[in-house]
Amino acid sequence: MQSGYNDSASVDRSSSGNDRRALQRLLDELGRLPGIGPKSAQRIAYYLLESDAERSRRLASAILDVKKQVHFCPICFSYATGSTCDVCADSTRDQTTICVVSEPRDVSAVERTGSHRGLYHVLGGVISPMDKIGPDQLHVKELLARLASGEVQEVILATNTDVEGEATATYLSRIIKPLGVRVTRFAVGMSVGGEVELADELSLGRAIEDRREI
């Protein structure tokens, strides 16, 4: 009898240990998400634990689906579900203007303003020597290839107004202007150090509409 009791206790302890490891794994994965600290990860984890299984399955399915269906547009490097993104596929967009942004999420921010009806080009980051990111690690060559056709008349540099964003804009301006393409930058409306993604629609819209040549 004693031996059976010990075996049962060992199973219970093993099961409890597995439960803790599963919870810790979830906390660790949530904590790797941007903007999610330990407390936020804990709140989300406990919310999922207390929710019904179907809700967790829907969340897991949505994550897997977006990874399967969404990819980078081969032209502008924004997010796409078809052969190209919706903007590149829209023949009514102004083909003579390209708005250059750092990340795909910045495209959504600019689109919400309704102030830009041209095309986009996503760099995939900014020049940052401290992070060992130079022009070769960004989609700069692809941007220059798009300008080679001569159809584009203006490039709007819509990188963030922090140090790295300004350095990237300066670099791009220096290599694009000799091509005879007009290069413009945000006007007043975007605060110094501001991020495109976080700017309110009114300020970002005014910054685009009143852009200045550089």
Image (spheres, rainbow, N blue to C red):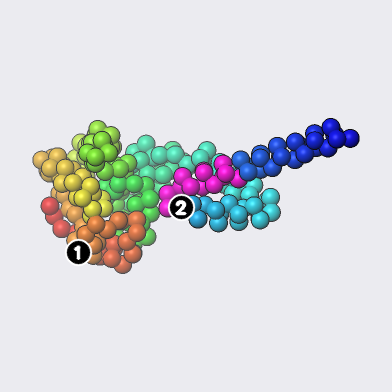
Sooner in the amino-acid sequence: mark 2 or mark 1: 2
Residue 46: assigned label: none
**Which residue is farthest front?**
2
The foreground one among 131 and 27 is 27
Residue ID at (58%, 51%): 45
| 50 to the left or right of 188 | right
Q: Position of residue 63 (x, y in %)?
A: 54, 44
Q: Position of residue 143 (x, y in %)?
A: 25, 39
Which mark is nearer the camera, 2 or 1? Answer: 2
Task: Magenta stretch: give its range.
Answer: 23-36
Residue 37: assigned label: 2
| 43 to the left or right of 174 | right
Main secondary-structure element of the magenta-colored stretch:
helix
The foreground one among 212 and 15 is 15
Neighbour tally class for label 1: few under 14, some 14-19, many 20 plus, Cα within 10 Å? some
**Secondary structure found at label 1:** loop
Q: Position of residue 205 (x, y in %)?
A: 29, 63
Residue 188: assigned label: 1
Q: What whole-number distance in Å separates the C-alpha atoms at marks 2 and 1?
A: 34 Å
